[in-house]
Image (cartoon, helix red, strand yellow):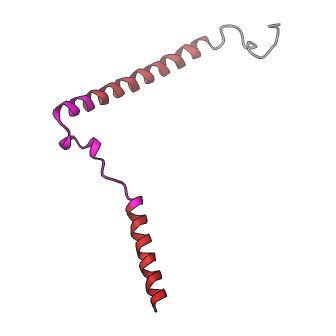
Amino acid sequence: MKASLFSFVAAAALFVTTAASAAAPADHDRDLRRMSPRERARYEERLRFEQAQRERDRRAAIERARWEAQHRHDRGPAYGYGYGHR
């Protein structure tokens, strides 16, 4: 009787601790209501910077793709395959 009760308590404790550790913690760092005005301004500035960086990266990728498409056959179709370039 004691062994089955102990195993039940142990199983319940393991279940509770596993569920607690697997649950997503509250993201207090991103909660704008809990930030000071200085922290909030710095966080929003970083968000704007990251958004601008993504936009620059996107534009650079578009420009790179455009340039590569424009210059793809400038040196002839055999360039890069070892035909006549020795």
Task: Give me the residue at 45% from left, 76% from top.
Answer: 11
- Residue furthest front in the image: 2
Q: Main secondary structure of the magenta part?
A: helix
Expressed as whole percent of the image width and height from the top left, the position of residue 76 reads: 71, 9
**Drawn side of residue 8 relative to residue 84, left or right:** left
Magenta-drawn stretch contains 41? yes
- For the point 41% across and 72% down, which residue is it? 13
Residue found at x 21% / y 29%: 41
x then y, percent, for residue 45: 27, 27
The image shows residue 48 at horizontal and vertical percentages of: 30, 27
Which residue is rendered at x = 60% and y = 11% of the image?
Answer: 71
> Which quadrant is home to the C terminus?
top right
* Residue 26 on image: x %, y %: 30, 52
- Determine whether 85 is above or below 69 in the image: above
Q: Which residues are magenta?
A: 21-43
Q: Quadrant of residue 80?
A: top right
Task: Give the farthest residue toward the bottom.
Answer: 1
The quarter of the displayed image where residue 81 is located: top right
Is residue 17 toward the left or the right of residue 70 in the image? left
